[in-house]
Image (cartoon, coloured by chain):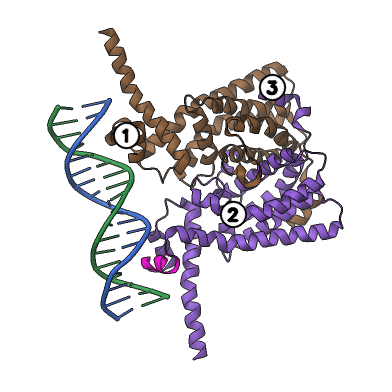
Chain colours: A brown, B purple, C green, D blue
Amino acid sequence: MATAKTLDTKALGATRERILNAAELLFVEQGFEATSLRQITSRAGANLAAVNYHFGTKEALVRDIFDRRLRVLNAQRLAELDAAEAAARGRPLAVESLIEAFLLPVLRMSRDRAHGGHTFIRLLGRAYTEPTEMVRKLLAAAYVEVIERFKRALFHALPHIPEKELIWRMHFALGAMSYAIAGTDSVQLIASYEVRDTDHTEAIMKRIVPFIVAGIAAPLPAASPASERIAA
Amino acid sequence: MATAKTLDTKALGATRERILNAAELLFVEQGFEATSLRQITSRAGANLAAVNYHFGTKEALVRDIFDRRLRVLNAQRLAELDAAEAAARGRPLAVESLIEAFLLPVLRMSRDRAHGGHTFIRLLGRAYTEPTEMVRKLLAAAYVEVIERFKRALFHALPHIPEKELIWRMHFALGAMSYAIAGTDSVQLIASYEVRDTDHTEAIMKRIVPFIVAGIAAPLPAASPASERIAA
DNA sequence: GTCTATATTCAGATAGAC
DNA sequence: GTCTATCTGAATATAGAC
């Protein structure tokens, strides 16, 4: 009966996973509020009551979606940073290595279409601008450790730029990333030619690193006459 | 009775405006889906049925909110670009001037707290990543002319960078802007110190121009060994 | 133009049989 | 763990008096 038991356990867990996957997809397509539990369970091939059984509430379902993926993503980011710092042997990291440590795990997850990683990365891009307080708090909590580590590494890498300035630039960089990843469709807004979806994320990654590295290490705004005009 | 008639007309128009303003504010705070017509009319001091009378549907209300502001914003952007090009007398524009032409109207509107401009700019930042197809189509239509003009100016300003690359970078820049503006709250995610809300937008503008200018004019990705590793 | 009252639909959540 | 059936509340939208 060991076989039967194994199969049963797998089947039980499968419903929960199917709900998580279906919800991830629908949330990307329609947003959190606009997606009903009925849509989710229907696409997951599960019963409506299953959501309540497995997660308790819709909010808890959202929480579990982010937990499941962010745990992996952030662990990989820290591991990449550890590796880069080990390779640097005490010297400050190149900004490039820093950005890559942050982005490589995103690219990796985004490539994983079989297990919904691709879907989640798009969802993540949107989540940063989510108005729902719950989602924002969730992200803030999940990111606090990662941000701290990368902040310190960045201060160390660019000691001649004031920390306050670097924090702003990290923020801009995060925006460029999130938006670029989330806007799979809105690229059409700017591009006049077709963007093939299959290589979308990889194309972004390849091109965004030089953009961000240059932005992060840009000349100080005080040195730029333009900022004076704008601030005036 | 001219006076009475004027007052009446003002009062009539006022309800419509109050609804638009209240909706703008609530949409920023809660998102489109999560905001009910009841909340809107209640905050606007109007009757629930007034929305249907003035706008027909909730969707049409959203449309009118964007129309009202984007008309002004984009006209100013084109005017700024015209002025900059006139001043350049046929020579290519500095990338800095381009970015400023795009951003100055945003700053201007964002400063206008009395008439809700500030609120709309935050809403605009969020709108780019809205999952609702309606909102995305609305933006795309409103932006097509502006994007075309700025694209051409950018190609002219940086002829040594491939157009396809520049389009990507415009996209990244737009992301950094939108996200930075939308994320009034999420700055807390990165910043460990307090950010005073009053000078938030101005601080962003002052600091984001050098970041974007450097990113747009960055060395080509082919020249960067990092991109190779990422694309591999 | 503005109101009250209401029609209609659909949301999240749960009780209880299997 | 999964199902059916249902509760309860709230949403958009509208009809019709003023």
Is residue A93 among the parts visible in the rendering? no
Q: Which mark is residue A51?
A: 1
Task: Name the N-terminal-most of marks 3 and 2.
Answer: 2
SS at mark 3? helix
SS at mark 2? helix
Amino acid type of the residue that numbered disc 3 sits on in the rendered structure: Arg
For label 3, count other residues whose C-alpha is less than 10 Å away and answer few (under 14), some (14-19) or many (20+).
few
* Image quadrant in which you'd find residue A151: top right
Instruction: Judge left or right: residue B193 versus residue B11.
Output: right
Kindly indicate whether the residue at mark 2 contacts the one at mark 3 (C-beta within 8 angstroms): no
SS at mark 1? helix
A81 in the magenta segment: no
Most prominent secondary structure in the magenta stretch?
helix
- The residue that disc 3 covers is B229
- Which residue occupies 72% across, 19% down? A90
Instruction: Judge left or right: residue B197 versus residue B214.
Output: left
What is the span of residues highlighted in magenta in the rendered image? B46-56
Same chain for the residues at labels 2 and 1, yes or no? Answer: no
For label 2, count other residues whose C-alpha is less than 10 Å away and answer few (under 14), some (14-19) or many (20+).
few
- Which residue occupies 78% across, 42% down? A220
Instruction: Judge left or right: residue B49 versus residue B146.
Output: left
- The residue that disc 2 covers is B141
Amino acid type of the residue that numbered disc 2 sits on in the rendered structure: Ala
Chain identifier of the residue bearing label 2 in the image: B
